[in-house]
Image (cartoon, rainbow, N blue to C red):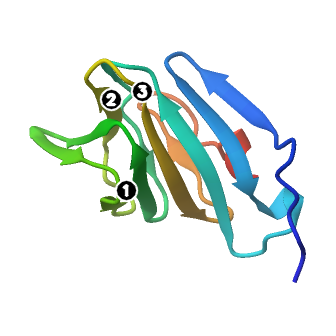
Amino acid sequence: MPLINNANPPSFEIPGVSFVNVAAPSRGSVENAIWRTRVEPNSLGLEHHMTREEIIVAVNGKGVVQVGAHRYELAPGDAFAVPAFTSFRLGSLGDEPFEAVTVLPAGSHAVVAGKPSFQPAWSI
């Protein structure tokens, strides 16, 4: 039962989104990776899908999960379970960033159209 010290956790950025690792196999977990996600105001992330179910828990701000033509708004405390192999986009609504905690089974891969699958750095 390892203690994962988050006094100075690894962080990663892609345009418009930042990720802070909370727990991952490289840091002591075995079955799941957990990270904090911050989406810049009024933005919608890149469409992608995961090879396993991804759970997004809203913490602060207003978020949106877009699956095809459907938009699901998230308020603090809401959770959204994105099924495996379901293309989606995560975004922020309004003038404040959207912040969430995300859970993904260890070893899962992300897939962006036209690119090889990969393990997100924040989940390894």
Residue at (33%, 29%) from the top-left corner? 92
Q: Residues within 10 Å of mark 1 (few under 14, many from 20)?
A: some
Residues marked 3 and 2 touching at CB (< 8 Å): yes
Q: Which residue is mark 1?
A: 85
Is 99 left or right of 86, judged from the image as shown?
right
Q: Report the residue at 52% width, 53% height from top.
A: 101
Q: Secondary structure at mark 1?
A: loop
Q: Which residue is mark 2?
A: 92
Question: Between residues 124 and 23, which one lies in front from this camera angle?
Answer: 23
How far apart are the two marked residues, 3 and 2, measured between alpha carbons? Answer: 6 Å
> Is there CB contact under 8 Å for labels 3 and 1?
no
How far is the residue under mark 3 from the one under mark 1? 27 Å
Q: Nearer the viewer, residue 27 or 101?
A: 101
Q: Amino acid at mark 3?
A: Pro
Whichever of callouts 3 and 2 sits on the residue coming sooner in the sequence is 2
Q: Nearer the viewer, mark 2 or mark 1?
A: 2
Q: Earlier in the sequence, mark 3 or mark 1?
A: 1
Residue 108, percent across and down? 60, 59
Rounded to the nearest angstrom, the CA distance separating label 2 from label 1 is 22 Å
- Mark positioned earlier in the residue sequence (2 or 1): 1
| Residue found at the far left of this picture | 69
Q: Secondary structure at mark 3?
A: loop
Total of numbered circles in the picture? 3
Tell me the residue that label 3 is attached to: 97
Numbered disc 2: secondary structure: strand
- Indicate the quadrant containing the N terminus: top left, top right, bottom left or bottom right: bottom right
Please say if 42 is above or below 25. Answer: above
Name the side, left or right, on which 49 lies relative to 72: right
Q: Is residue 98 above or below residue 75?
A: above
Neighbours of disc 3 within 10 Å: few (<14), some (14-19), many (20+): many
Q: Label 1 amino acid?
A: Phe
